Each structure stands twice: as structure tokens, then as C-alpha cells.
Amino acid sequence: MAKVNIKSLAVAAEIVASIAVVISLLLVVSSIDQNTKSLQSINDNFLYELQSQRLRDVTNDGELASILDKAFAGKDLTNSEKRRYRYWQQQNVNSWELAFNRYKDELLPEAQWNAWDRYWSADIPASVTEEQWSAIRYQYGDDFAAHVDAAYARH
């Protein structure tokens, strides 16, 4: 009779251990999900900070604001102004690539990616000529470059 009780206890212990393992795995999955959401939020906030810095640059730098006004009005820029404008625009493309890569790595939520992508897909082809894009295209990853090419094709 003692053998039957030991066997019953062993079976019960295995069941309890199995349940504990399942509960532990569920807690790990929940923790990973929370960490993923946190990383996604951090990446989205970082993109907002990059854009905010670009806006602050224009607000705080009258010369840059004047260059942008001239460029948007289609007026001629000096070589120095062209360089500053080109670099300012390339920062925008760099942010787009950052968002693209974070989204591909599942570190940016789909809703945020879609919003950012709609913004850049409209803004960049409208302000960076296709020739300018072609000149810097080599600096970017193939997948991102193809994504930008598609935006130009739609524009």
C-alpha cells in the first residue's frame, strides 16, 4: 500500500511541476511582450525627438530658416546654402531609414510606422528631387532604397 501512495504522490508532483512550468512560460511570454512594447515606444519617441530637433534647428537658426524659405520658393542658393539644405534634407531621409529598419525588426509598432511612412512618402519626394535621391541612394540599404524608389514612383 505504501508503494501505491508513493506512486500517486510522484504522479501528483509531476502534474504540479508541469503546471508550474506552463505558468512560468506564460510569465516569460508576458515579460517579453512588455519589453517589446517598451522598445517600440522608445523607438517611436526617438523618432519624434529627431523630428523635434530638426524643427528646433529651424526655429533657432535664422540662417537655416532663410535657406529653407529660399529653397521652398525655388530661388537660387549659394553653394554653401545648397550644402546645408542638402544635409538638412538628408537628415530627414536618415530618419525615414531608421524608422524603416526599426519596423522591419519589429521594434516600431505598425500604426506608428504607417503614420511616419505616410509623412515621409509624401514629404521626401516633394522636397528631394529624384536626382538628389539617386545621388545618395548608394548610402542606404537595398530594402530601404527600394522602398524609397517605390515612393518616388507613386509621387
Image (cartoon, helix red, strand yellow):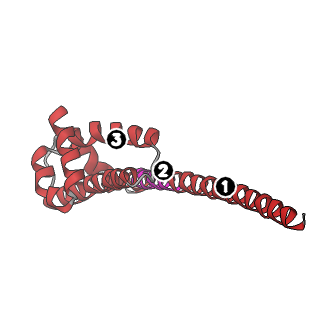
Under mark 2, the amino acid is Asp
- Left or right: 56 with respect to 68? right
Q: CA distance from mark 1 to mark 3?
A: 40 Å
Secondary structure under the numbered disc 1 in the rendered image: helix
Residue pictured at 22% horizontal, 58% vertical: 141
Would you identify the image quadrant in which residue 9 lies? bottom right
Q: CA distance from mark 1 to mark 2?
A: 33 Å
Under mark 3, the amino acid is Asp
Residue pictured at 26% horizontal, 51% vertical: 67
Work out whether mark 2 precedes mark 3 in sequence or the reverse, and give the earlier one.
2
Q: Nearer the viewer, residue 147 or 81?
A: 147
Q: Tell me, for residue 44, which label it has, or none.
A: 2
Q: Which residues, given as a range, are shown in magenta?
A: 42-55
Secondary structure under the numbered disc 2 in the rendered image: helix
Where 111 falls versus 55 (above or below)?
above
Q: Can see residue 107? A: yes
Q: Which residue is labeled 1 in the image?
A: 22
Secondary structure under the numbered disc 3 in the rendered image: helix
